[in-house]
Amino acid sequence: MLGAAVTGAAAASAVIACWQTHSKTASAGGRISAHDLQRFKRLVASGKLLHPLTSTFSLTDLSCALALCRDLPVEPVRSKEAQTIAAAIGGKAKQHVVFLLCDGMGCSILEQHLPSNSFLRKNMQPKQMVSIFPSTTPAALMSLATAVWPGQHGAPGWDLRDHRNCEYPSNFGHTELVGPVHLRILYPFIVDSRSGKSAKALGYTDDEVFASQPVTSLGPSDRRLLYVSAYQEGDFCKWSECRECLAEAPDISALIPETDHHDIGSAKGSMGAVDFFAAGVDRVLEGVSTADRAGEKTYTYFYTAHPDKHMHQLGVEHAEVGSIMRGLDTHIKRLWHGLEQLDVTLIVTADHGHVTVAPSEMVVLPADVEECLEYANVGVHGKGRHAYLHCKVGRRADLEERWARHAVLRDAFLLLDVDDAVSEGLFGPEPMKLEVRPRLGDFVAMSVNPKTLVTAGEAAAHHDKPQGAHGSLLPDEMRIPFILCTSCGTSKAT
């Protein structure tokens, strides 16, 4: 009996050793994800890709600095960077802080469309700041709202796949929520884009959607708040701007109208975008001046969806994008000239930059690769530049093997194991929160050039026109302007 037990133990040990060998081999250099991890490091070292943690400052550092200037009790992971920016702004002592975010207005957009003597170009510090990863609006706006990195706040991209509950066979047909949902944050309401139902209707609470709290929940600020934004009435804005504050003082929030989709590409569309922005500038000037006369300190958040909205439909180089940029430059200069007699700091930046994707650069996943996937988070306007791939059970190795067969996938994308991407700090310097991790799946496929993963329907719809996109780590996507204008004017507050 003892001999049989020893034999059984030896067999079990052999099985375990075999499994461990297979596991090590699966993550060793023979797999394309391991090869691409080394390639990723080389591309970052060469400057062909920009890591969100290796530049001087990140958008998240700026968010922490703005919270410090509002005297909110944030604890920045990168305290030195946040404190440096906060000091440059003027800290808690600065009377008025105006923060302007122009969606999509990366450094390369300024350099392409504005002369070197323009207001924005003259005041830009081009090597100071980068976006976060993924370089896309929901991830960036969430970092601005929470002062934490995407790995902590839970919105590292669009349409994130989430599964709220454990399922049981006996429960099928008896619960509203069966199967995963596809959360979209920036929408009139937080929605499951699969069904069109609100996340709330499917049983989600705010704490289950958002993995971190907004800085507005950390405590009162001594600054009067003013929000002037193209996004103003949705669930995300109400959550991030403090529902209680909006209820007590509804005048702190002002909505900028948006260009009609059908006008994009025409002079009417670009002129409308500039006119709407100009009205936002007027609202900011009015709000800050009124507060100053009353002796109040202020923090203003000013957001415009341009030039991003036009670039997505037209590409970066289009003449109407240039028209919008010249209009923005004119009115941002006017904004500063209307403020500079006060004790004020104006900060202008963007959430990300843009690249143009030609129809020939739109890549549809090959059928044999798609066979291995349960969910492919791809899309022409950004998702496909940092595609999250969820494999079918047991198909990870198949996916890597099949991916490696296709030259366009091998050459144009880095296929990284999501856990490796987390370890490399792509989603921030801290370990990713456990509740966030399932939303990213097994692999992230990052573009290393303009090629972008799209659905077959998108490729057909855009077969004759370029589109603007962002979301990966190319310098044009990651480099964002850091424009800081500060005055020592006289304010009435003491």
Image (cartoon, helix red, strand yellow):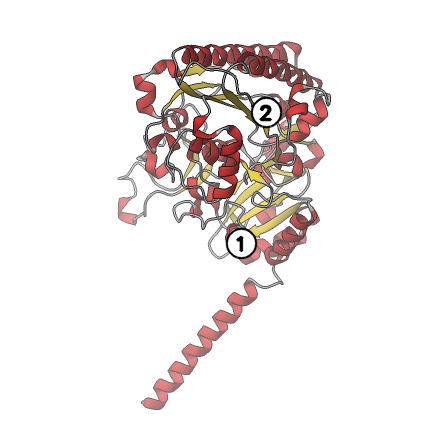
**Mark 2 / mark 1, whichever is N-terminal:** 2
- Residue in view at x 60 percent, y 58 percent: 34
Dot 2 falls on a residue whose secondary structure is helix
Amino acid type, callout 1: Asp
Horizontal and vertical percent for residue 484?
Answer: 57, 26
- Residue in view at x 58 percent, y 21 percent: 306
Judging by the rendered image, the residue that carries numbered circle 2 is 308
Amino acid type, callout 2: Asp
Is residue 345 visible in the rendered image? The answer is yes
- Inter-mark Cα distance, 2 to 1: 31 Å
> 81 or 276: nearer the eye?
81
Horizontal and vertical percent for residue 395?
Answer: 52, 55
Horizontal and vertical percent for residue 446?
Answer: 60, 44
Q: Quadrant of residue 347?
A: top right
Q: Residues within 10 Å of mark 1 (few under 14, many from 20)?
A: some
- Residue in view at x 44 percent, y 26 percent: 93
Q: Residues within 10 Å of mark 2 (few under 14, many from 20)?
A: many
> 62 or 106: nearer the eye?
62
> Residue 420 — which label?
1
